[in-house]
Structures are given as C-alpha cells and as structure tokens.
Amino acid sequence: METNEELDKVKNIIRIIPKARKISRLYPQNNPVCMKTMQEVYDRFDDFFGNADTLRLQFGKNSIFYNSESVYHNPERMDNLALLFFKDGVRELTFKKGMTHAELGDFLRIISRDFDMDMEDDLVTILWEKNFENISYVVEDSFLAEGEELEEKAVREVRQKAPGSEEEPLKTFEDNAGNGGAIKDLTIFSLTDDDFRSFFSELEKEAHDKTGKLFNILFELFLAAEGPGECSEIANHFMRAVEFSVTGGNLGTVVEAQANMEQMLQSDIHEEAKKHLSKVMLYAGGHSILTIVGEMLDKGGQIDEPTFRNFAGHLKTNAILPLMKILAELKSISARRMVVDALVHIGKKDVSLLFQELNDPRWYVVRNIVHILRKIGDKKAVKPLLKLLPHKDIRVRKEVIRTLGEIGGDSVLEDLRGGLEDTQPQIRKTVLAALGQIRSESARELLIGHITGRTFNGKDFNEKKECFQTLSLWRDDSVYDFLVRILKRRSFFSAKKAENRACAAYCLGLLEKRDALELLNRYKTCGNKLLREFSLNAIRKLEYGS
C-alpha cells in the first residue's frame, strides 16, 4: 500500500469517529441510524486492514499520529478527540486485524461517555475492565493526578518532554584499589573546613563543571585514607558535595558518583572505606536529599526523566519511606509518575515497607501505594490488601480488587465473591474483570455459581451480559456445555430468564464454536425479540466472523 493511500485511510477512520460518538449519544444502539454509522466505521477499519495487520495511533494533547505523521489536529478543548485520550494518560492505541463488530461497538460506546460528568470512572478504568482482545492501549499513569486538583488542572500540568542527552560518566578512579598503582607515591594532605568552604564558594561560579572534579578528589582520598577518622571526615565532605550538587540542580553528577561508589564497593578496598561509602549511598536516599529532589521534580525542567531514573536506580531501601511521603505531596503529574516508577523499582527489594502507608487517611495516597504494589506483583502484598476491601473510598476498593485479580490467584476468590453482590455497580464490574484476570477453573466455577444463583435473575440485563461475557473468556468445553444448557432451558412467561438465554446465545457466538450453529438456528425465528436478535448475532459471528 502506498504511504499516502495508507495515511488517507487512517484519516478517514479518524474523521468518522467524532460523528460516531455524537450519534452514539443521541440514539440507542439498535437504532437504524446508529447501526448504519457503526457499520460505516467498521467498513473503514476493514478497508485499512486489507493491507495491514495493526493500526497503531499515538496521542499528543491536541494531535493524533500514525507512523509519526499527523492524522488529526484540534487546538480547541471542545470535542478534541486527541485530548479525550491524552488527559486520561492514554499515549498509544492499537487496533488489530480480526477486531469484531461487537468490540468496535463497545469501544465507540466507551469513548462516547461524558467522563466530565462521571466522577467515579475514567477512560482507562473502563478500557481495563472491558479487556478487549483486539484493542490494546499504552497508558501513562495519569490517574495519579487525582487528589487535590481537578482534571482540568491535571491536563494543564502534562508537559511534552523531549529526550535529554546524558553526559558521559566521568572516570573517577583507576583500577588501583588493590595494587596501589597510580596513587602509591601520592602525598595526601588533609583538607580543612576552610579549604572546603573556599572550594564550595568557587563551585557556585561553575558548579556543573567543578562538582565532578570534587567527587574525583574525594574518591582518590578514599582510596588513600588511613583509619576510621579519615574515612569519616571524607564521607562527611562527600555528603556535603551530594547536597550541594542536588541543590544546584546538578543531579547528573550525583548519578556518576553513585555509579562510581557502587564500583568501589565491589572492589577490594579496605572495609572501613566501604563502611563509610555505604553511609554516603544511604544519605543520597535520605529524607533531606529526596525532599529537595521532589521539589525540583514538581517545578519541572530542572531534572529530566532519564537522570532521575538513573538516580533512583542506585537508591537503597531506606529511600522507600521518604519517597512515599514525597509522593503524597507532589502536585505535578509527571513528577508523581516518576516517583511511582522509582518506588516500583526500589519497592521490589523490600515490599513490606510499602505496607506502612496503607493506613493513611488520604484515599489518593492509599490508592497510589496499591497501584505500586500491583506493578511490583509480589504475592506478599495479598494479605494486607485484603484488609482494604471494605475501604470507605470506592476508588481505593477498585484498585485493590484489580490488584488482587492480577496477583492473588485462587487464594482471593472467596474474598472477591462478596463483591459480586456489592451495592455499588462499579465494584461488581471490577470484580468481574478481576475474575477474568485470574481465569482459573475455580474462578470459572465461582462465576457459574453466581449466574445460577437465586439473585441473578433479578439483575440488570447489561450486568447479566457482562457476567456471561466474562465467562466466555475461558473458551473451554465446560463453559460451552453450560451455555447450551442455559439456552435450552424453557422460560415460560419469564422475561428475566429469557434474558439469560439471550446472553447465553450471544456468548456462544463469542466462543467461536461452530457446533453451536444447529442449536442457535432453532431460535433465529423465535417469538422473543431479544433471544431472536442475539441468536442471529451469534450465527452471523460464527458464519462470517462479525
């Protein structure tokens, strides 16, 4: 396919999506106008997939890109399709060949919702719960912006960052730790406090250049130091140099020093030097240094992301508690995201330290920590997370359930069971998605038991459909047999039971087992409209794949 033709097809898809969103808001999904528009959208995707297997879109604040080419731009806030995804952290969206009518329809209905009015849900949450097979996304954890500010403020704070260039690390010492080498005949003079005051005064003039030189001198002094007294004195000067560099915004020099310290700690220098170097490493992850770093991250522009990531990569577990306290106070989205990533990296070394903040009275602090635990994926978090299931804030409960679904396995099924009957619809939906994540035999049997339970018939039809859709994720013979039994069950004068049969017919189509065609054909002309329509939809999917 020629590049221009390919771009035109992508632009045609993008152009019709705003129209489909408006129509989806105005008409029910079975309205002819809505159905015609949905088919037109599907046809444009189908045309594109005639020569490609995937359609991958990237999102800026006001623009959408395909293969680095702009295919959409809207500088206005109203009806801005790019901003719809960007403000909720979606940076990339991928549609795969094989996407069904049902998936596309569900996706369009999701993005047609008014998220400014719906304060309990966001775009990323609903996409995660839907768990599309042929639609995937890459998200930048922008939900961490929730807390003290509104979404409008969060959008203003998102900045596009250009990748920065890192300086080559300075070579601070040679491989002479064990053999004397370059410093064997070196005469060492002790530096007084006056010497260091004079040195720091000069550093203020050319800080970025001379702090590196100071660290080099201190490393050489460490190699030649004799006795605990000298090591302690040099370590104190090291810590002052770290503080000076960080305060001046020269975190890159500290990163170079951290790397060299770790290299020295792996060498055969004497134990007293190692002891005091370790003390300096811990100081870099202490509350005073990290508070300065946090303030700079919040202001933006002073510390780039690669430099902070490298800095955090050298931090020890003593940095976990200070970073969590800083995270609770940060206002910038990008700063929160960077600190979260740092906590994910460091928290893997001692996940129990993260548990201490789970009792914080601020809901957004608790949810951030739960999110970090989910990204770490350590099963030791399951027990403390179970205690948060009855949390008073629904946003915390939803994040806990998501996390348990990803790391808890069968051990949390009994605890999640009650969530299927929760008074909050969003909790029930999140539990369903969690069961789909676990996707074990026990989870399948729990869901089947829920569907056959006494309360299920009285539930809302859309909720029933979601339960059956989740069950169809297993795609095994036991689920197929169960759906067949439901469909064959007579429902004399019972509209609610007829809904169950319609859902079963719908999901037989999702299982993609053509053995179901004979049974489904019996109901394509039945008197119940819902069962008839769902049977016809399932037949079309099995016969034509759509």
Image (cartoon, rainbow, N blue to C red):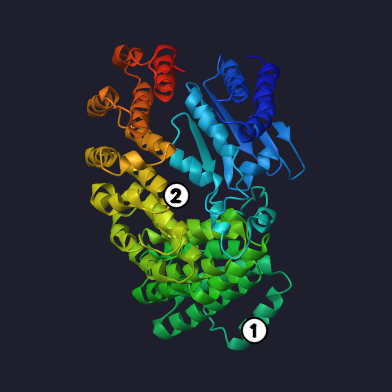
Q: Is residue 245 left or right of residue 371?
A: right
Q: Secondary structure at mark 1?
A: helix
User: Given the image, on which type of amino acid does mark 1 rest?
Assistant: Arg
Q: Residue at x 47, y 57 (%)?
A: 395
Q: Nearer the viewer, mark 2 or mark 1?
A: 2
Nearer to me, 29 or 332: 29
Q: Give the mark count.
A: 2
Q: Residues within 10 Å of mark 2 (few under 14, many from 20)?
A: some
Using the image as rendered, state which of residue 281 and residue 143 is in the foreground: 143
Residue 252 occupies quadrant: bottom right
Q: Position of residue 253 (x, y in %)?
A: 59, 64
- Compared with 496, 169 (above or below) is below
Residue at 68% in and 23% down: 12
Across and down, in percent, residue 201 comes to: 70, 80
Please say if 326 is above or below 412: below
Residue of label 1: 197
Q: Residue furthest front?
A: 493
**Residue 201, above or below 435:** below
Residue 192: x %, y % from top left: 58, 87
Say what secondary structure mark 2 lies in. Answer: helix
Residue drawn where x is 24% and y is 52% of the image: 414
Q: Which quadrant: the N terminus? A: top right
Is residue 116 toward the left or the right of residue 267 in the image? right
- Whether residue 176 is visible here, answered yes or no, is no
Q: Is residue 101 left or right of residue 166?
A: left
The CA span between labels 2 and 1 is 61 Å
Q: Earlier in the sequence, mark 2 or mark 1?
A: 1
- The part of the image, by quadrant, that contains residue 334 is bottom right
Residue tagged by mark 2? 426
Place of residue 408 in the rendered image (x, y in percent of width and height, measured from the top left): 29, 51
